Image (cartoon, rainbow, N blue to C red):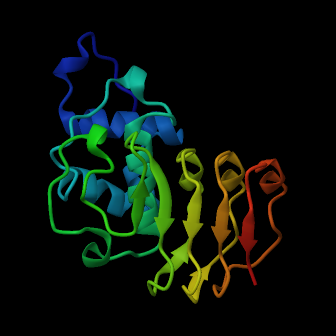
Amino acid sequence: FHRHHSQPSSIDPPDLIEECICKLTGLMNPFAHPAYSDVEDWFLNGQGKSISPPELEDCSWKSDFAHLFALITLRAALNITTASWYNKFTVIESTADICGHHWNRIGCNDNNEIVALHLSNGGFAGTIPSEIGAITTLKHIELYKNFDLKGTIPSEVGSLVNLEILHLHQTSISGAVPTSLGKLTKLQEFFID
């Protein structure tokens, strides 16, 4: 999928978004992958359609765009509905305003960084995507009482070096706890059934 252009500004914004996601995921055609079809719709037709795409050199997992991509991937993976995800139906215009007042269940600090996912008791189903590991500013993840949440804990959770609270109890998550969680020196609470 990678195209070669002499002037990045000549690429259409949807193509730049796809190029950035190609760079993040390592997939040649990420929107053809079933895990990203809802993500594509969000960025190209939904609330993210007005977001200016980042320059390709800014497409790293530390970027605001990557954090937004991880959030929208999480939304799709857990089958979170629009009504339970947004305070109101709004078009998000900038990744710099990732925290804004757009979201229910997302906590941010004064630096406009995502620090909490309050997703407990939401009736969510699906699996935790590996992309959650990109949001390294997270301190709290609360996914308990989502009985149809299944799969395993992705090893990428071990990248969340600021994580203090991880509540995964009263879910159907199974399998071994990844050894990467041993790197989480700030982790104070970890609950799983």
Q: Which of 102 and 42 is in front in this view?
A: 102
Which quarter of the rendered picture does the N terminus lie within? top left
The x and y percentages for residue 81 are 31, 77
Within the image, what quadrant is residue 190 found in? bottom right
**Left/right of residue 144 with respect to residue 193 in the rendered view:** left
The x and y percentages for residue 88 are 17, 68
Q: Which of 37 and 115 is in front in this view?
A: 115
Q: Residue at x 63, y 85 (%)?
A: 171
The x and y percentages for residue 163 are 65, 54
Residue 67 in view: yes
**Left/right of residue 168 with respect to residue 54 in the rendered view:** right
Q: Which residue occupies the extreme top position in the image?
A: 6
Within the image, what quadrant is residue 3 found in? top left
**Left/right of residue 30 with respect to residue 82 in the rendered view:** right
Which quarter of the rendered picture does the C terminus lie within? bottom right
Q: Which residue is drawn at 79% across and 74% down?
A: 175
Q: Residue at x 19, y 59 (%)?
A: 46
Residue 132 against residue 67 in the figure, above or below: below
The total of numbered circles placed on residues is 0
Q: Nearer the viewer, residue 148 or 44?
A: 148
Residue 106 against residue 144 in the figure, above or below: above
Residue 128 in view: no
Q: Which residue is drawn at 39% across and 69% down?
A: 105
The x and y percentages for residue 101 are 24, 57
